[in-house]
């Protein structure tokens, strides 16, 4: 796939950009080395990229478990000076290693925040009011046979505990307040500009919440932050919403809590081993399951293309990045 | 049938006594009329001995309270046990649902009783009882109708007004839950939440990857609300928090409101991305969302209905969806519930719920409170809590 002529366009390493229009727009501007279409294993692919007459100075990656931008990766492509992550999360990038080597990093900024917040609220309403479950009831033709459907529960007055009050958490809070929910939160430290009640631990947050929302990044500290203890504190009328990362929750504990009725329901957009979803969840009517699509609307795809190209252009022309993560 | 057993249980728990003495019985003061009813009751027991089997059954229903001066109450379709029990504690309940009779016979028997009912409680939606001239002729003793539903289209309000029959409904008990459900359904349609679930639950994620139609952003959508009453206003407030732009149509513009007003539903639809039906069903609103309005809404448009099925021309809606002339729909109500047009079942861009917008455990409890509150007020000659017919009628009521 490498060109034998001197490249006119700057070389760009690409991982997991599969959307056709996005791919085409990047190929108009850059000499794209696409891992997905190379057919090679990662090691061979990176070695070939590094050996390119104009080795790549920039990388676009969607994240996910396939590629980790870590020390070994950066060693394999020493020409790399800039990493752009199209995803909302950064857990697939070793930021310390990048900082150490002076590799700049940018991400999609707040491109996705609103859509993720909207999706999270949509799932929350769905679980409390049993919208999708009622839908299945109707589609199976049960309405004429079985009459009315089980009651949902009112949104107003519900205490929603948000783990992580960043962009997404704040947007969710604003929406939920319009329904009359009471907002509680936990984060590394309290936010001064905010009037919601702060809890220093996730356990305490859960014990005073009816709905627990995971809206934080995945890190060493937040790995399995929702565990058995937290689920017990949430209690049998509580529900969990996850639009962070699957690993934020101890999935096995969550599934058994649901199976045993120790919590009342869940709305999950992310899972520990996507696209694998624990099979027990498929038979449950009190869970809402979506395929890691909270960030993805037609509009956010378009916004993402703009943000990606905007940051890449800034990098290649030596201008400040639009949505930098590093340097801080 | 389970309830019949409960009704036939001998009334061990209610010894013969004046209900005024019991703290758990209804709190309203017993009027002279109630004393008169006490006399009438013993006469009624004699009457019932000669009555038909059905009337005897009804009397046995009332046996537990026959010795107490409880007012008679006509009841249509209260199936919830707690609610039914709460009503039976306070009233001599004449329950159409358990009578086993046809409506005309049931009403005739109620009217022929020594203390015919002055009040009726109706659960709207699907009940065969339409409170119209024929109904009111059949039970001339009726002076008050309480409707538990949000919709009033099965009650001939003009006829009630003409005869001085007061009417109350559930007021705003349901409004928030209906608004929340409407927004939930709207989010589901736009963000394809239920469709994603079908995708996942069929095991398609590992097979097809992320390939699945994308949803569309909620913020910035122009939402046109037909009917800006309690429910419409609550929907507007919620959607504003998502960054939607709100406009509306109603009989006349609301002065206290800053949303853009459109004089016709057609014009509203032509400048909306989402059309929300949140109005009552009436002669004027029947089929108001028709082919013309759907065309004005356009192929990217979405329709949400939490009003009444007949407000939308259902066949035209189904055709528009089938032909891709609109983008999707979220429907909690249908023209002939519980019948849902079969074509909708094969569509991934529609969300269908079985008329559940009002159904939360909290609103059930609130409904019991407001129903009994209104009935107590009526029987005590006090102003109704949530009247539908003008208050002037109520003044006349208490004097009579």
Image: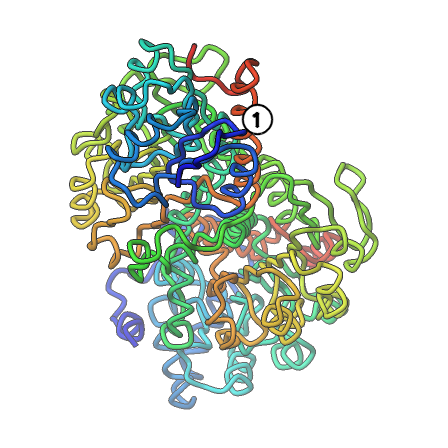
Q: Is A327 above or below relative to A253?
A: above
**Residue B373 visible to an observer of this rendering:** no
The front one of A226 and B85 is A226
Residue B93 in picture, x, y percent from top left: 44, 69
Q: From the viewer's perspective, is B341 left or right of B99?
A: right
Q: Quadrant of residue B170?
A: bottom right
**Residue B345 visible to an observer of this rendering:** yes
Residue B152 in picture, x, y percent from top left: 63, 64
The front one of B289 and A36 is A36
At x 19% / y 35%, what residue is drawn?
Answer: A250
Q: How many marks?
A: 1
Looking at the image, the residue that sits furthest to the front is: A5
Which residue is tagged 1? Answer: A310
At x 59% / y 56%, what residue is drawn?
Answer: B378
- The image's colouring method is rainbow
Q: Is A285 above or below relative to B110?
A: above
Density class for disc 1 (Cα within 10 Å; few <14, some 14-19, many ≥20) is some
| Quadrant of the image containing the N terminus of chain A | top left
Residue B167 in picture, x, y percent from top left: 64, 61
Residue A288 in picture, x, y percent from top left: 35, 50
| Quadrant of the image containing the C terminus of chain A | top left
The front one of A318 and A214 is A318
Chain that bears disc 1: A
Q: From the viewer's perspective, is B293 left or right of B26?
A: right
Q: Is B110 above or below relative to B158?
A: below
The front one of B353 and B42 is B353
Q: From the viewer's perspective, is A88 left or right of B31?
A: left
Label 1: state its secondary structure: helix
């Amino acid at each position: 796939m490498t060109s034998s002529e001197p490249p006119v366009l700057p070389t760009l390493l690409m991982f997991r950009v599969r959307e056709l229009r996005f791919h085409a727009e990047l190929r108009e501007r850059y000499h794209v080395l696409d891992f997905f279409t190379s057919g090679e294993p990662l090691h061979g692919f990176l070695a070939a990229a590094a050996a390119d007459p104009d080795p790549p100075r920039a990388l676009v990656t969607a994240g996910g478990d396939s590629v980790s931008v870590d020390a070994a990766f950066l060693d394999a492509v020493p020409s790399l000076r800039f990493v752009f992550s199209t995803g909302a999360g950064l857990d697939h990038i070793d930021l310390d290693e990048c900082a150490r080597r002076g590799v700049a990093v940018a991400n999609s900024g707040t491109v996705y925040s609103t859509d993720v917040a909207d999706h999270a609220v949509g799932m929350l309403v769905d679980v409390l009011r049993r919208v999708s479950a009622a839908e299945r009831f109707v589609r199976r033709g049960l309405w004429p046979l079985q009459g009315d459907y089980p009651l949902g529960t009112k949104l107003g007055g519900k205490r929603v505990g948000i783990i992580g009050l960043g962009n997404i958490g704040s947007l969710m809070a604003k929406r939920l307040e319009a329904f009359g929910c009471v907002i509680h939160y936990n984060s590394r430290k309290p936010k001064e500009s905010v009037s919601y009640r702060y809890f220093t631990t996730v356990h305490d947050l859960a014990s005073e919440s009816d709905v627990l929302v995971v809206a934080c990044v995945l890190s060493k500290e937040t790995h399995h932050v929702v565990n058995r203890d937290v689920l017990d504190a949430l209690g049998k009328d509580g529900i969990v919403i996850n639009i962070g990362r699957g690993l934020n929750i101890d999935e096995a504990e969550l599934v058994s809590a649901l199976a045993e009725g120790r919590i009342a329901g869940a709305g999950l957009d992310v899972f520990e081993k996507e696209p694998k979803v624990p099979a027990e969840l498929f038979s449950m009517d009190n869970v809402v399951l979506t395929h890691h699509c909270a960030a993805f609307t037609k509009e956010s795809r378009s916004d993402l293309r703009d943000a990606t190209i905007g940051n890449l252009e800034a990098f290649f022309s030596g201008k400040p990045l639009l949505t930098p993560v590093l340097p801080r | 049938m389970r309830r019949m057993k409960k009704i036939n249980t001998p009334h061990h728990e209610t010894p013969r006594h004046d209900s005024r003495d019991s703290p758990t019985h209804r709190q309203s003061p017993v009027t002279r009329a109630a004393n008169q009813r006490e006399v009438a009751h013993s006469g009624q027991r004699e009457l019932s001995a000669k009555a038909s089997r059905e009337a005897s059954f009804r009397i046995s229903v009332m046996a537990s309270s026959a010795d107490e001066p409880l007012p008679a109450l006509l009841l249509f379709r209260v199936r919830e046990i707690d609610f039914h029990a709460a009503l039976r504690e306070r009233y001599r309940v004449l329950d159409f649902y358990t009578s086993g009779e046809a409506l005309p016979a049931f009403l005739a028997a109620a009217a022929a009783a020594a203390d015919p009912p002055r009040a009726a409680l109706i659960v709207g939606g699907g009940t065969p009882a339409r409170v119209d001239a024929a109904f009111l002729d059949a039970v001339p003793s009726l002076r008050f109708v309480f409707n538990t539903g949000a919709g009033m289209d099965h009650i001939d309000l003009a006829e009630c007004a003409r005869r001085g029959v007061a009417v109350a409904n559930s007021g705003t008990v349901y409004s928030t839950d209906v608004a929340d459900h409407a927004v939930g359904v709207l989010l589901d349609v736009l963000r394809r939440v239920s469709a994603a679930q079908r995708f996942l639950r069929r095991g398609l994620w590992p097979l097809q990857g992320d390939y699945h139609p994308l949803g569309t952003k909620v913020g910035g959508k122009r939402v046109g609300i037909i009917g800006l009453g309690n429910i419409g206003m609550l929907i507007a407030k919620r959607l504003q928090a998502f960054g939607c732009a709100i406009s509306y149509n109603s009989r006349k513009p609301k002065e206290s409101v800053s949303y853009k007003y459109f004089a016709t539903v057609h014009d509203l639809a032509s400048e909306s991305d989402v059309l929300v039906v949140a109005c009552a069903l009436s002669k004027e609103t029947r089929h108001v969302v028709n082919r013309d309005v759907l065309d004005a809404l356009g192929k990217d448009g979405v329709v949400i209905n939490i009003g009444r099925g007949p407000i939308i021309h259902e066949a035209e809606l189904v055709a528009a969806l089938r032909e891709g002339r609109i983008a999707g729909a979220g429907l909690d109500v249908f023209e002939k519930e519980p019948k849902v047009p079969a074509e909708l079942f094969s569509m991934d861009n529609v969300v269908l719920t079985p008329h559940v917008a009002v159904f939360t455990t909290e609103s059930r409890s609130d409904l019991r409170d407001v129903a009994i509150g209104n009935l107590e007020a009526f029987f005590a000659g006090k102003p109704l809590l949530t009247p539908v017919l003008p208050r002037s009628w109520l003044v006349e009521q208490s004097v009579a």
